[in-house]
Image (cartoon, helix red, strand yellow):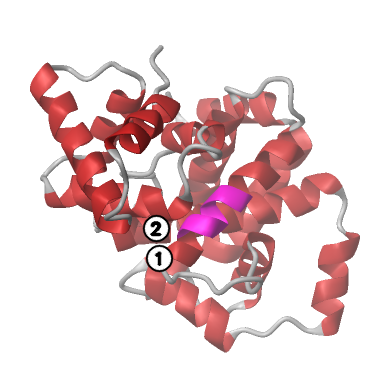
Amino acid sequence: MGLGSFLGGACRAIGSALSSGISRVCSLIGGSALGSALSSAVSRFVGVVATPFPALEIAKVIVTVAQIIVKVAEALGLKETEKDEPEELAYKAEKSDKKPDDFDSTEEYIRHLQDDIELSEEDKKKLEEMDEDELSAYRATGTYIYTKGINEKLGFDTEGLKHPELVGLTAELIADLVKLAEALTPQEFVAYSKGIRDAGMTLTDLADYLHGRSGDISTAKKVQDVIVGAMKEMKPEITQEDINRKLYEMNMED
């Protein structure tokens, strides 16, 4: 599918106003070449995470997803609590005269935005007064940037924003995390992800395990062993009954 066809599909899926807003924000952040690729990636990201929640308005889905990603970013030290929320990060990116591909990693780019770019009171007022679609475009773009940083921090992505597609923590897996919000904390997800990485597996293996669709029993057992090991490391006093309950709560078998 060509870029034009994809963006047309994304526009229909997430609404033309939001799609146009994402395109505008990404163009201002990344310039003409990277901006188009970034816009495509963010639009797909929003469309995919929204798919499992057809009853929710798209703006509410973006808020919910942003909350999950923010907590994971905080657990990894990519974001300070109550500072540089996703919409603020994207607004800072728009104000910066540097582009994402000026940096060797997304984390470096995020640090630049956090440390070097200030939002004026006028900027903050503009954010507060934006209509729902415009604010959602900034929030979705900032959430996507944090997600790229998370993937790199966890060791699943080495290309950064120069390659806009998500590797590791994908939009599909983020939708799972939204559904598992009560059963899987951000800190637990980070611990499990690091264990999965260290065991030579991918987050696709984790997603397959959660849905009961692992290709073979040995892979499913390896994933479960990683999860159980992380549980015991985080909470040495955990009982087998608590472990079994936790594993049951995480089950999303299709």
Q: Position of residue 233 (x, y in %)?
A: 24, 56
State the residue in front, 189 or 29.
Answer: 189
Residue position for label 1:
76
The reply to whether callout 2 and callout 1 are in contact (CB within 8 Å) is yes
Q: Position of residue 155 (x, y in %)?
A: 24, 57
> Which region is colored magenta?
67-72
Q: Position of residue 208 (x, y in %)?
A: 29, 24
Q: Residues within 10 Å of mark 1 (few under 14, many from 20)?
A: some
Residue shown at the point (42%, 23%) measured from the top left: 1
- Residue 35 seen in the figure: no
Residue position for label 2:
150
Residue shown at the point (46%, 47%) measured from the top left: 37
The amino acid type found where label 1 is placed reads Leu
Sequence-earlier tag: 2 or 1: 1
In the picture, residue 194 is in which quadrant? Answer: bottom left
State the residue in front, 202 or 12.
Answer: 202
Q: Is residue 71 left or right of residue 15?
A: left
Q: Is residue 138 left or right of residue 121?
A: left
